Amino acid sequence: MSLFLGVVTLDTLPNDLKMKSVVLSILYPPREGHKSMDLFEKCKGGFAEAKAAREAGLYPYFRPITNNEGTESVIDGRHLIMIGSNNYLGLTMHPKVRQAAIAALETFGPSCSGSRFLNGTLELHLELERRLAHFVGKEAALVFSTGYQTNLGTISALIGRDDVVITDKDDHASILDGCKLSYGKNQRFLHNDMDSLERALATVPDSAGRLVVVDGVFSMGGDIAPLPKIVALCQKYGARLMVDDAHSIGVLGGGKGTAAHFGLTDDVDLIMGTFSKSFASLGGFIAGSADVIDYIQHTARSLIFSASIPPANAAAALAALEVMEEEPERIARLNEIGAYMRRRYRELGFDIGNSETPIIPILIREQTKTLQAWKALFEAGVYTNPVLEPAVPPQMTLLRTSYIATHTDEQMERVLQIMETVGQQLGLIP
Ligand code: PMP
């Protein structure tokens, strides 16, 4: 290949290295007094905030888990009660789910080595799509390799240059990234604030297509989107509605998600789900009318240009779906634990915001104290997730706790005891 340098090309430069550099310095003389910015300057010494937290002995992230039995884990040699996972139904430990993954691995190998679009579709994927569509009450479904890619691909496929996507300020990052990837305009409304949503809808010109996207259950606050009001506003302003049910499937509406919880399945156009939580796997899906799913299937770049969900993950998700249908008592138990823990935390005086689900934030509202609380709980044998800026605004820093259908009563009492001690030590509760 030759690079043109005026009349000279790299090919025609002398072979002698010294000569070559002389010629190049004539062609590209150093700019007087100019010092160009090094892109990596900001990386010197690593990521500054992480370094500071490490030095203070308060760094909570990327800790390797050496053993994970669902409700209990071993991290840094410590046995911990796990209240920091999204394994809501405890199905990562279910023999049927594990067995299905092993059998698919043995039959099809570890990877499809290609995209769904070309050489990466198995009958297993199609069966999973049919079963998911039926489960959530839609005509068709499409399986992606992660929930993140599902939001990225779906939103960017549907929102064209002249369209508007309207999102809740607390929507998951993958929704925001899907909006950024689209060519359309993104308007955000205040969290669960219906006046703010209506103001956003009212400004969209008639010529624009419009899509409202909300989390069904908000991943940090554990509160539920007010779907009846959102549906009414979407109908008033002719907007389509997509609900991210990552944290609702397996939890609300008999496991079928937020739309089912409110009896609004036909009024929600698109239902999104992920396999990385109740489904005990990895992957994601979007469900809706057959035409819309067909359109997304042929235009979503995160589907077309990425390898398909591996067979073991598809098989695990399918088995998990069957367990959800066969063992509804798991869903009931999860919600019972959620209700019990919300009541007890509130009685103890913790600020748990507007949680209505088994995701229960402990609002601390101060970054260092949040990390101190995380560490004290960790050392006392409880695993939680500290949620800091920029995931939440600084006045909203929290410990995210979430529960599993297989948690025992004893584990819950132990968690409450430790929470009470730590909460009092740090002045979070009286
Ligand atoms: N949506 C929501 C609301 C989520 O919480 C998450 C994951 N935390 C995702 C989408 C992305 O899912 P996945 O982990 O499968 O990529």
Image (spheres, rainbow, N blue to C red):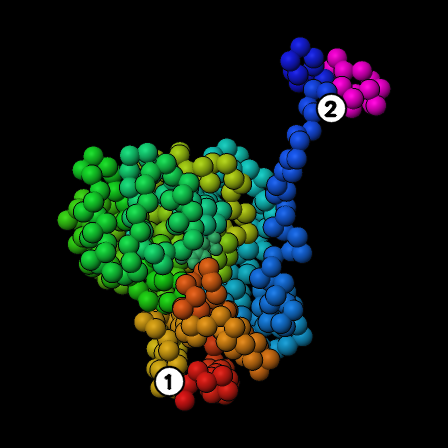
Front residue of this view, candidates 47 and 29: 29
Label 2, ligand 1: CB separation under 8 Å: no
Q: Is residue 344 above or below residue 6?
A: below
Estimate how packed mark 2 is, as few (under 14), some (14 to 19) or many (20 or more) residues with alpha carbons within 10 Å: few
Return the residue found at the far front.
33
Give the x, y percent position of residue 207. 20, 34
The amino acid at mark 1 is Gly
Front residue of this view, candidates 353 and 225: 353
Q: Which is more foreground, mark 2 or mark 1?
A: 2
| Quarter occupied by residue 32 | top right
Residue at x 54%, y 47% (from the top left corner): 310
Label 1, ligand 1: CB separation under 8 Å: no
Q: Quadrant of ligand 1?
A: bottom left
State the residue position of label 1.
349
Residue at x 74%, y 15% (from the top left corner): 11
Give the x, y percent position of residue 97. 51, 60
The amino acid at mark 2 is Ser
Instruction: Provide the residue span drawn in magenta.
Output: 11-25
Q: Secondary structure at mark 1?
A: loop
Q: Is residue 405 visible?
A: no
In the rendered structure, the answer to whether residue 289 lies left or right of residue 130 reads left
Residue at x 54%, y 79% (from the top left corner): 377
State the residue position of label 2.
25
Residue 240's disc number: none
Q: Is residue 103 visible?
A: yes
State the predominant SS element of the stretch in magenta: helix
Quarter of the figure that contains the N terminus: top right
